[in-house]
Amino acid sequence: MTAPKPVTLITGASAGIGAALAHHFASNGHELVLVARRAVALNELAGAIEARGLPRPHVIAADLTKNDAPALIADELCARDIEPNFVVNNAGFGLVGTAAELDRAEQLAMIDLNARTLTDLSLRFVDSLARHRGGILNVASVAGFMPGPGLAVYYATKAYVLSFSEALHHELAPKGIRVTTLCPGPVATEFQSRAGMPEGYFPSILDRSVERVARDGYDGLMAGKRVVIPGFPNRVAAFLPRLVPRGIVLAVMNRLRRQ
């Protein structure tokens, strides 16, 4: 009986950072499993990777806000006789607006996707990750370092991702598993339109391309880094809240959203 083939599982792979990560992992010799809701977009991405002379990725269309999605993904992997050596938890979304006025069900779905599903997929495949001495790349945000009025639940979920993943970095190290948290600043993707974010919501100095973010995330994971923050301005933005009283940070963030 042959062992299952190792693959890199990437969620939220249909566009943006997820698609860029898929191209970068594929270029570095990884066979992929792409997961997102939109089967058409996933198959187009798989075709684009195959057209470059690389192995065609597996595609799994799944709604990752559903609590049973990780189990369904695991069953599908088993049916295809493949198992993760790397897990990339990129899927997530945000919503701009006052938390009390935004749709509560949508915000709870955000928590399910950004935090619950990420946690499940980070822990579900530990045995196979250890067998292959692979790793986990969890996509958080610079938002995880500060409170975010106007994006309260989103910022809170990214703070959870950062804290959880940093702890896993230490807990799983004895098993030979790398855990890296990727904390990008603003990136021009579908995220902004999904969140209802107006143009110029964040200072342009923080912007980074999806290709740069994907490259930095991949390199950081392979190097076993705990946290990767692409771009010097974003590293400064993430560091300053550690020096300034929390109340002042909150007031500054609240003022920025009103400008």
Image (spheres, grey):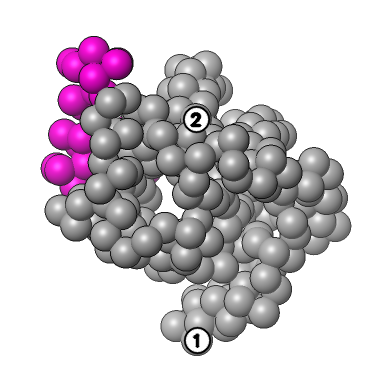
Q: Is residue 185 above or below residue 79?
A: above
Q: Nearer the viewer, residue 256 or 138?
A: 256
Q: Splitting the image into 4 quarters, where does residue 38 fall? A: bottom right
Is 113 left or right of 1, judged from the image as shown?
left
Residue 258 in the image: x percent, y percent?
A: 31, 44
Residue 113 is at least partly visible in this image: no
Please report the bounds of the magenta region as a residue range. Answer: 222-249
Q: Is residue 201 above or below residue 256?
A: below
Disc number for residue 15: none
Residue pictured at 59% horizontal, 35% vertical: 100
Residue corresponding to mark 1: 51
Q: Is residue 236 above or below residue 95?
A: above
Residue corresponding to mark 2: 156
Q: Splitting the image into 4 quarters, where does residue 128 fall? A: top right
Amino acid marked by disc 2: Ala
Mark 1 crowdedness (10 Å alpha carbons): few <14, some 14-19, many ≥20: few
Residue 95 in the image: x percent, y percent?
A: 52, 49
Amino acid marked by disc 1: Ala
**In terms of secondary structure, where does tag 1 sit?**
helix
Q: Is residue 241 magenta?
A: yes
Whichever of callouts 2 and 1 sits on the residue coming sooner in the sequence is 1
Residue pictured at 80% horizontal, 61% vertical: 80
Residue 175 in the image: x percent, y percent?
A: 55, 23
Residue 45 in the image: x percent, y percent?
A: 55, 76
